[in-house]
Image: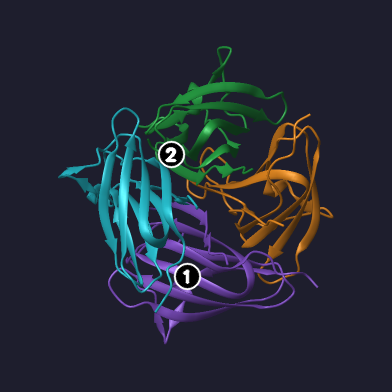
Chain colours: A orange, B purple, C green, D cyan
């Protein structure tokens, strides 16, 4: 049995889904989760906005001893996705410790731009 | 009532507003703040330079349960903005804990470049 | 004699080897390790996937008072490399403390994109 | 009098000075330091390589209440700069606490690529 490692609570303040793509690749963001443990991790995501109420409790499962690179465009609350072209922020709570990194590929131009950072862990 | 999470004091040593833009998007930097709590957060920003005195106490409000992606070009002290094309650094103090990420889009060329990092939290 | 500094256990959730390159430079990722100590560091890497069992115990040596920028495409388990174009995650355990940064150059287009972040340290 | 904040010991494992530039901007890396205190900070940098002995004790001064964005190409040891096109790592020790971020602009193509991360703080 492998032990869970990392933290249960993570934050990414700079979320943004580029509204357009051109060229070979598609603009997207990924919430990249590693679950080191033998058990499944249950994640609950909250999406915060600048000018409206948060979208709460979007559920994602990450199997044991697996990674999952979650496209933010795939997250839905009651059938509604995160709006594109709007600044937002992401909070993730997991029932067991995991590690989370956030990356964005912007393909607004055919020549891509990339950015990445570890999510910020909220401890205790 | 939601609790405030994160830290009250953050630093970004590499600030720089690209002086030019070309193509579809505008060069800019953002200080992306998440306020998880139910209460408003009051931020005070200090801008440090290489060769002159700091600009102190620029105030920004982030409402409760909201994110704010603050363009650094919008920050002003006595009507004067941060100069463009000049290396600087940012210190942010908040009256309640928040989480801060810094991102820059450089559109000096029509093909953009992106960078992002969590701000550095000063604890205790 | 120089002392070992950093941590013995690091994680990078967002691994991805771009399958194509064009232009002057080659798409690649690097796990950049600094070994401050006078002694050799023995690293054991585990590669996690979304839909298959992990590749475990890939060994890398970093000499004392040296850095090593390890191309992930050079890592092999029983002669098999990490597959390209597939999301994965990296766990690194070292027998002595080291510091690890992760960077990716995406040259899918002749115009490159770069991203970098410190790996996430697992303490205690 | 303003208090020093941050850490006295920082590491950047992924150093690399791109050997070529094209287009409008010059390829470069910057070690961006913020000295919040009223006193001058004295930094000593060590440069580690993959296959040769470190360059030790390169001294840089950062005045009080100032930032300094240090081009790595400006660092010299006995008149010798850091070689370009070679993987290296940076260790910085400061006599008082400071905060350090590392950024690279790669202008190998006229279309730039950017990356940035906080340096890794070594505590205690």
Identify which residue, C28 or A7, lies in the foreground: A7
Q: Secondary structure at mark 1?
A: strand
Q: Nearer the viewer, residue D98 or B27?
A: D98
Residue, x 58% and y 27% (percent of image)? Answer: C45
Label 2, on which residue?
C3
- Asked which quadrant contains residue D43, the reply is bottom left
Q: Quadrant of the N terminus of chain B?
A: bottom right
Q: Residue furthest right?
A: A78
Which residue is found at the position 68% from the left and 70% from the top?
B66
Query: For the point 33% across and 78% down, which residue is it?
Result: B53
Q: Which residue is mark 1?
A: B91
What mark, if any, has residue B58 been given in the picture? none
Question: Outermost residue toward the top?
Answer: C79
**Same subunit under labels 1 and 2?**
no
Element type where label 2 sits in the image: loop
Q: How far across and how far down the image is residue D60, in percent?
A: 27, 57
Mark 2 — on which chain does it sit? C
**Residue situated in front as seen by the camera: C13 or B113:** C13
What is the spatial separation of the Cα atoms under label 1 and label 2, in whole angstroms? 33 Å
Q: Residue furthest front?
A: C1
Residue B76 or residue D43, whichever sits in front: D43
């Amino acid at each position: 049995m492998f032990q869970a490692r990392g933290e249960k609570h993570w934050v990414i303040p700079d979320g943004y889904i580029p509204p357009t793509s051109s060229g070979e690749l598609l603009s997207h963001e990924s919430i990249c989760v590693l679950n080191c443990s033998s058990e499944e991790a249950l994640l609950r995501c909250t999406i915060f906005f600048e000018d409206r109420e948060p979208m709460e409790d979007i559920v994602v499962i990450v199997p044991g001893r697996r990674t999952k690179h979650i496209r933010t465009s795939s997250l839905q609350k009651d059938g509604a996705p995160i709006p594109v072209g709007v600044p937002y922020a992401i909070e993730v709570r997991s029932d067991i410790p995991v590690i989370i990194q956030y990356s964005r590929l912007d393909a607004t131009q055919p020549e891509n731009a990339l950015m990445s950072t570890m999510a910020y862990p909220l401890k205790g």
